[in-house]
Amino acid sequence: MINWEWTFADDFENNKDWDNARIYMYKQWSTDRYNIKKLLRTSFLCWTICIDQGNLINNKMIKKEESKKVLDELFNFGLKFFRNEPDFLWLYGYMMTLTPTLFGDENLFEQIGKQWKYEAYIKSNNNDIIKCIFLEGLDDESRNKLGYKQLCRELIPIIESTFKGNGYMQKYFKSLFLIDILAKS
């Protein structure tokens, strides 16, 4: 799995300087377009800005429409060059299942998101984080059959090392997993 730490981007995000974070990350990705970490971190920030309802970003000056344009560009680039990469599949699959209308037709993109999480799970072999992302989207009965609760408990020691750094994305997924683990224990 990718080392998600990105010091300058993390600093912008921690200072809640969302527009400058997006601008910096996009410029860095533009000069290194095949860097999947830069593509995915920038995508996640743009997605977050697009879906935020004022809980995180309370500045009306944030350019949501610009973030949506960048997200679309990153998505199309990723689709062309990273379509078979588990990290691209699980992250975009996750975002699509939560907000399918942001990507297009609600039913279509919700199904694509589920399919991509499954593909990421199959392609990643033994990556328990990706397995957990996939299983989390299943119904309770299926999760129980596939050992979701036990897997969640086993993830506790590796969550910090998997989501190194203190950027928004890392904090988001650490929090998501820890809340889910505690709720499922």
Image (cartoon, rainbow, N blue to C red):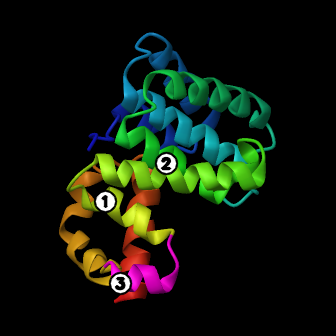
As shown in the figure, which amino acid type bears the numbered disc 1? Ile
Farthest residue, direction bottom:
185
Which residue is at the front of the view, 13 or 125? 125
Where is residue 54 drawn, in percent x and y?
75, 56
- For mark 3, give the secondary structure: helix
The residue positioned 44% from the left and 80% from the top of the image is 142
- Residue holding disc 1: 129
- Residue holding disc 3: 145
Query: Which SS does the magenta portion mostly show?
Result: helix
- Residue holding disc 2: 116
Range of magenta residues: 138-146
Q: CA distance from mark 1 to mark 2?
A: 15 Å
Q: Residues within 10 Å of mark 2 (few under 14, many from 20)?
A: many
Figure quadrant of the N terminus: top left
- Specify which label sits upstream in the sequence, 2 or 3: 2
- Specify which label sits upstream in the sequence, 1 or 3: 1
Q: In this rendering, would 107 be left or right of 166? A: right
Where is residue 16 drawn, in percent x and y?
57, 45
Q: Mark 1 near mark 2, Cβ–Cβ under 8 Å? A: no
